[in-house]
Image (cartoon, helix red, strand yellow):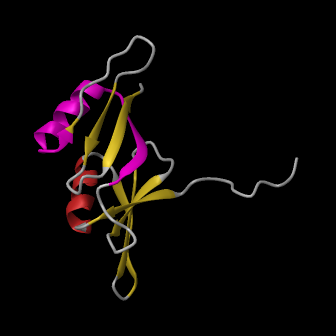
Amino acid sequence: MTNPTFTGLQCVAVPVTDQDRSKALFEDCGFTTTIDAELQPGFRWVELASPAGGAGIALVRVGDDLPAGIDTGIRLLTPDARAAHAALAEKGLEVGDLLDWETAPLMFSFRDTDGNRFYVTERA
């Protein structure tokens, strides 16, 4: 076997209009800020990690080539999808229907304050 080109996934960038507001939302949902720095004038990098580890989420400022309101494709895990669904709805976020199929774990989607879509799957 040859040496792998890639050895892991550090984070996934999500475009947001207000990094502080988005950072507060994810911290309120259990994420921890691991980096919050201005890497160069006008370019702030905010990276958060989930309590379970793995790849994080980077909140980057929107721009002409990086609009908000995207389908991120990001799948978040929760031990209790019903409770997560209720908590996100209480925060005033748009949450989709709970999908309760016999062949798959309980899941739903939600949109953050910028309209970015995330997916949530129940896993103990």
Q: Residue furthest front?
A: 64
Foreground residue, 80 or 61? 61
Instruction: Depth check: give the residue in front, 105 or 73.
Output: 73
- In the rendered image, residue 91, in percent from the top left (x then y), is placed at 13, 44
Residue furthest to the right in view is 1
Q: Is residue 85 above or below residue 3?
A: above
- Residue 91 magenta: yes
Residue 93 percent location from the top left of the image: 17, 44
In the image, is 54 to the left or to the right of 23?
right
Magenta stretch bounds:
70-94
Residue 47: x, y in percent? 40, 63
Please tell me which residue is depicted at 51% across the width and 47% down the height of the picture: 54
> How many numbered badges does the structure rendering display?
0
Find residue 118 and report its image quarter: top left
Q: Write the residue at 15% across / 37% down.
A: 89
Q: Position of residue 3 (x, y in %)?
A: 82, 55
Identified at 44% across, 42% down, the residue is 52
Asked if residue 59 is positioned above or below residue 54 in the image, the reply reads below
Q: Quadrant of residue 41?
A: bottom left
The vertical placement of 99 against 119, above or below, is: above
In the depicted structure, whether residue 42 falls above or below residue 56: below
Queried whether the magenta region covers residue 82, the answer comes back as yes
